Amino acid sequence: MREENIKRSIVNFLKFQRIQEIGILMILIFLCIFLSIATTTFLTSINIFNILRAFSWIAISAFGISMVIITGGIDLSVGSVMALSGLVTAMMLKTNLGVFLSILGGLLIGAFVGFINGLLVSKTNLPPFVATLGTMSIARGFCYGLTGGWPVRELPSGFMLWGQYDIPFLGVGIPLPVIIMIILAIVTSMFLNRTAWGYKIYAVGGNEQAASLSGINTGRVKLEAYTFCGLLTAIGGLLMTARLGVAAPTAASGYELDIIAAAVIGGTSLSGGEGTILGVLIGAAIMQVLRTGMVLLGFPAYWQPAAIGAIIILAIIFDQYRKKRIGLLR
Amino acid sequence: MKPILRVEGISKSFPGVQALDRVDFEAYLGEVMALVGENGAGKSTLVKILSGAYKKDAGRIYLEDKVIELENPYHAQKLGISTIYQEFNLTPNQTVASNIFCNREPKKGGILGSLGFIDKEKMEDEAKKLLEIIRANVSPTELVRNLSVAERQMVEIAKALSFEAKIIIMDEPTSALGPDEVEKLFEIISHLKSRGIAVIFISHRLEEVFRIADRITVLRDGKLVGYLTRGEASPEKVINLMVNRPLAEMYKKEESKKGSVIFEVKNLSKKNTVEDINFKLYKGEILGIAGLVGSGRTEVARLIFGADKKDSGEIYIDGEKVEINSPQDAVQLKVGLVPEDRQNQGLILKLAVRENIGITILEKLKNFLAVDKNKLTEIAQHFVERLNIRTPSLFQKVIYLSGGNQQKVVLAKWLALNPKVLILDEPTRGIDVGAKAEVHAIMSQLALSGVGIIMISSEMPEIIAMSDRILVMNEGKIVAEIDRKEATQEKIMAYASGHLN
């Protein structure tokens, strides 16, 4: 009897191990435990929520980009789109169009850039890297052109609360962006796993030829994925702008790499067909915990990027090794 | 006369297949040795062993009476054995001369040469000389991407000469050439012969073989079944050797009742691919399409299914004209295609069995926004049982299934659609004997239930045993329609190889 129980618990443990996200979750937990012991400030609710708030924008955009990456594509324009959507909303607020319309405008501009990306990729057959490299620059150019290079300041409080308000819950204040991130994680995850639309995304990325020969309109699937990525990125951009209280044309520069890194650390395969929203969420969390941890540990600021880069590479090597060992990878 | 190249008892096996079984083979200087056999007879495997691309399991290779072990293709080339494959090994964005001397470029004298600087003029001069030997009208400074297929082939031959090849192997060299270009190639081959080079010529087209071969070696199912000199060979004899094998009991074909015309193709054409294809498919019928690789069979299937764009042609389903411009249109009209390459075209290997089966019916499984997963599981379970798909669970990724079970998943995905017409391209290629028999039984059942089936196959016994009617294609055209009762392997082969028209 006892032996059987042990056997069963081993089997259960192995099953648990097979879950895609376990490897990176282990890394995240390890980082958190290490920082809790090494610093006195890590394990405080203020710090935890600061971390969560800080990566919520990245994570939300990473949900979008993971869909694009699952189709076998890439979107380099996300950083620029975050800035552009925040700017458009800020400028609309400044012309007194009201919070609702301004937010709608920002979201639509994000979705529009995504739609253009999708059109370029599916209709002109440009490689996604090239197409979105172009739109990255175009969107950034609009940021500078529309503002003459000056940031838009003094945004109304009705807009800023989206980035700054904390919802009281069991005695602590949970930042609104974090709640939005969690809701979007659930919605996107359901979309990918429950809907025909999500199935098709995995199918197109897994094998575009076979998907097409099974009657799937692969061009349309890609168009939708890029558009949705643009929309999610715009949500991230608006939350960022609301939090910072200023829309700068230089905002979110270089974020595309953080966003892609979050998706890839989260187990999204750059060759397409694989990836989960839970993984992306964990990936984004690892990135931010690393950043905050460095600061808390007093690691020299100028050396932080190098350390973060090295840790990302090590984390992915570890995850790949684990998957190979248990046969998830070939 | 002594052979320059002699091969004794060569064997080679791949998982589940004995590709070559103790084959003997030889080639003589100044002669053309033809190697013939059906698809899967082992010709390509033998060629790849002789060119150093594959390692043999057993047997000996003698070159001028010395035993040699071929390490890799480059080693074989240096020993004087050059192979020209159907797919050329040329870099399109470099010049003809650079391609001929790839990695062996003549260097400049002195210190520049030892630094790796190439003597371009010398290289181009030598390339020109080689091209003149075979009277190829190709400039050494031309970029390869600007050359026609025939010209590229000449570059490959010049490259072989630059290695001072004693033996040149040509794998299906005429398959991509027009009639004039074939003539030119034959001139080059006679020229190579007169220079004392041994040519090994692999072709499906028997008329060509009989025109230029001095000796013919016939392979069947990985075994040597015939060795003839030109004097003793006749087309009938060679065809007989190629296809004569006992019918296995794996072709269970039920007698089907021919119903009304369910599907009809009129005047289907695509430039340089297929020409004026017309046929009718009846309810409950299995229509076989036979022909050699490259005869346009797969192209017809892809055009009908909307995977490629046709130049002209009309398609009728149940007597009504329909437009199929994309695979989506075909799926809407309940036409399915089991493609020849199941791993790259039929399956999404990273996804599970259940997801692969459900892919054609996602829209039907929609329950408001979400896919009804219970229904999907139910349908997948049903087909896993019905087709006897051996998988540990519905959630197993198809990449881990065997070839036969993978093929059954492809079938299941189309059966889930409840098709009217099902096109199967090489439905049993590369799967084991048991699964093959099961696939045949499924096809037979489907026909019995009223589905119209079009089956493309290169396997003669399969075509003959499973088809109610057989269309034979040659060079993009349907050249014969043969009824089940009158079908023989010899007859089909004769039409398919262009010998009987």
Image (spheres, rainbow, N blue to C red):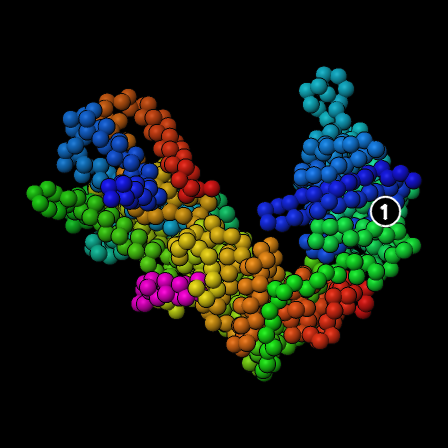
Q: Which residues are magenta?
A: B367-384
Q: Position of residue B184 (x, y in %)?
A: 85, 51
Secondary structure predominantly adopted by residues drawn in magenta: helix
Q: Can I make out residue A116 in this image?
A: no
Residue at 77%, 40% (x, y): give it. Answer: B8
Crowd class of label 1 (few under 14; some 14 to 19; many from 20; radius 10 Å): many
Residue closest to the eye, B439 or B345: B439
Q: Quadrant of residue B232?
A: bottom right
Looking at the rendered structure, the secondary structure element under dot 1 is strand
Residue at 36%, 62% (x, y): give it. Answer: B377
Residue at 72%, 60% (x, y): give it. Answer: B245
Residue closest to the eye, B181 or B452: B452
Q: Position of residue B79 (x, y in %)?
A: 78, 32
Q: Is residue B429 left or right of residue A170?
A: right
Relative to A248, residue B394 above or below: below
Residue closest to the eye, A172 or B10: B10
Chain ID for label 1? B
Q: Position of residue B323 (x, y in %)?
A: 55, 73
Q: Which residue is mark 1?
A: B32
Relative to A325, residue B186 above or below: below
Q: Is residue A78 left or right of residue B325?
A: left
Question: Is residue A198 found inside the magenta-colored segment of the image?
Answer: no
Q: Can I make out residue B114 in this image?
A: yes
Figure quadrant of the N terminus of chain A: top left
The amino acid type, in three-letter code, at marker 1 is Val
Residue at 66%, 69% (x, y): give it. Answer: B465
Relative to B354, residue A153 above or below: above
Q: Quadrant of residue B145?
A: top right
Q: Is residue B403 left or right of residue B497?
A: left
Q: Position of residue B49 (x, y in %)?
A: 71, 41
Residue closest to the eye, B83 or A13: A13
Question: Is residue B382 found inside the magenta-colored segment of the image?
Answer: yes
